[in-house]
Amino acid sequence: MAEKEMIQRNIEEFARLQRYMKLSDKSSEAYAEMKDRYIELKIILTASGINLTELDKIKE
């Protein structure tokens, strides 16, 4: 998979995950799992040079 495609997939997953997180109870186990993935995606996207200022709606 090309780097551009990988970045695009990660951006799409990041956006989708944030929508799910907003719908979930912050004290749930599901939210905790989503938060772990959220952090992983933030690291991946930041390391790829993506500015998350506009994309990050959770900001945790």
Image (spheres, rainbow, N blue to C red):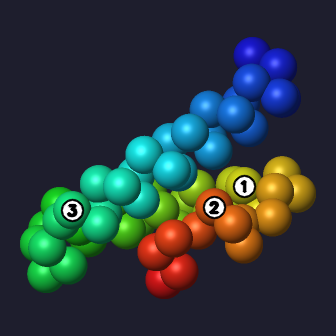
- Give me the disc on residue 45: 1
Q: Residues within 10 Å of mark 2 (few under 14, many from 20)?
A: few
Going from the N terminus, do you reach mark 1 or mark 3 first?
3
Q: CA distance from mark 1 to mark 3?
A: 23 Å
Q: Position of residue 57 (x, y in %)?
A: 51, 70
Q: Amino acid at mark 1?
A: Leu
Q: CA distance from mark 1 to mark 2?
A: 10 Å
Residue occupying the point 59% across, 68% down: 56
The correct choice, above or below, for 13 with respect to 51 in the image is: above
Q: Position of residue 33 (x, y in %)?
A: 28, 62
Going from the N terminus, do you reach mark 1 or mark 2 first?
1
The correct choice, above or below, for 1 with respect to 15 in the image is: above
Front tag of 1 and 2: 2
Residue occupying the point 74% across, 38% down: 7
Which corner quadrant holds the N terminus? top right
- Give me the disc on residue 23: 3
Q: Amino acid at mark 2?
A: Leu
